[in-house]
Image: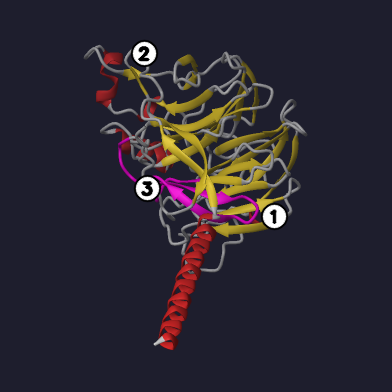
Amino acid sequence: MKRNLVIGLAFIAVVAALGVGSGLLEKKTTVEAAGVQAPRFEVDPMWPKPLPNHWVQGNTIGVSVDSKDHIWIIHRAGSLEAMETYAATNRAECCKPAPAVLEFDEEGNLLSSWGGEDGPGYEWPASNHGITVDYKGNVWIGGNGRTANAPATAESAGNAAPGAAATQAKQAAKAKAAPGGPPRYHDSMVLKFTQEGKFLMAIGKPGASQGSNDVENLGLPAKIFVDPKTNELYIADGYGNKRVIVFDADTGKYKRHWGAYGNKPDDTNLGPYRPDAPPAQQFRNPVHCAELSNDNLLYVCDRVNDRIQVFKPDGTFVKETFIAKNTLGDGSAWDIAFSKDPQQKYMYLVDGANEKIYIMLRDTLEILTSFGDGGRQPGQFYAVHSIATDSKGNIFTTETYRGQRVQKFVYKGLAAVTKKDQGVVWPKKN
């Protein structure tokens, strides 16, 4: 009897030990799973505040944050539908296009507005694209309009007012040069302004593009970055050309340019992107972003090829990664921004086809998680196009096509990654 009692107690002890061990193992596994952390965000559904004067935005095609944490956006008034501009033609009280460039403070108040018109010494882009406020406070603007006052890009032609699509198609046809020659793109330049909208400089001349190895003119430039260490201007060039090109940001003097893998750019039509084909040795249009990190690596969005390529500032190829590689049409690699820690540990990649933002480790290009979904409500996207971060780590995005808005995603610190796709990051209840 006593022997059986001892055996029974020993058995219970073993079971208990196994239970404790199992519990510790489960806890350890949970802790290890929670060890992967990433920045967490919540959409601010009340940002920005409504625009004054019955103003509305068209395709909102660029966003930048300046040293004062003011948020700058640029949009296309010409993309608005007729009913969105009734006030401009005295048909109704509402609405009319806002000026092309809008500046907001952190609370979402509109601070200033300007742009959209030609001025002394410059022509406004036919289809403005991208806005960058550099480290000196200058405002840079690109464009992807094929012909003057008649953008014929996928991002704009599909949003034209009724009856305008045929006109744009005719004007786009006129933009083609004689057989064998480069197309005559109107937006062959980038423009530099003060924050008050005073014109400072243009690099390139309207309608003068000679292709991807022209060192004086651009070919539908998508986005600009200015390196504060060297004062060099990096341009993702873009919708017509297939390259990155670098200029001096003060003088406009040409420095260097390159294509995919650091190759000399080639404007040969590569045909449609095929996910199962070998990686293209040239960029496809558009080359949509070029962002330089603090440790001097240039991240380039090869949008339709579904990839990010990384270079040294001299054009030496470093590495690449593919994002949602089976994405066709508009492609997956639209724009990037970095986290605000000195190491820029995280990279945020905008995907306007799959309607999400990927949170990635910048050094390895590994995707940790993503957020967003398609739709019209706050936190959802319709062609999310551009992205920027402020000094607090908040994210700002813009949407093209019928999205026509800017959104703010509030940084909530680091959190364990529990879902690959978070969906809509709606504010949590207090």
Residue 362, percent across and down?
62, 50
CA neighbours of label 3 inside 10 A, class few (<14), some (14 to 19), many (20+): some
Q: CA distance from mark 3 to mark 1?
A: 36 Å
User: Is tag 2's residue or tag 3's residue first in the polypeptide sequence?
Assistant: 2
Q: Amino acid at mark 1?
A: Gly
Which residue is at the front of the view, 391 or 148?
A: 391
Residue depth check, mark 2 versus mark 3: number of the one nearer the observer: 3
Q: Quadrant of the C terminus?
A: top left
Is residue 318 visible in this depiction of the protein? yes
- In the image, residue 223 lies in the stretch drawn in magenta: no
Local secondary structure at mark 1 = helix
Q: Please state the horizontal and vertical placement of residue 140, each as a whole percent of the image.
A: 60, 27
Image location (x, y in percent) of residue 96: 32, 17
Amino acid type, residue under disc 3 in the picture: Gly
Q: Is residue 277 left or right of residue 405?
A: right
- Mark 3 / mark 1, whichever is N-terminal: 1
Q: Secondary structure at mark 3?
A: loop
Q: Residue furthest left?
A: 91
The residue indicated by pointer 1 is: 262
Relative to residue 202, is residue 376 drawn left or right? left
Q: Around disc 1, counting alpha carbons within 10 Å, would you say few (fewer than 14), some (14 to 19), or many (20 or more)?
A: many
Q: Which residue is mark 2?
A: 52
Q: Is residue 4 above or below residue 422?
A: below
Does the magenta-highlighted stretch encompass residue 359? yes
Residue linked to disc 3: 423
Residue 345, placed above or below residue 394: below
Q: Point out the image quarter for the N terminus.
A: bottom left
Q: CA distance from mark 2 to mark 3?
A: 32 Å
Q: Which residues are magenta?
A: 349-377
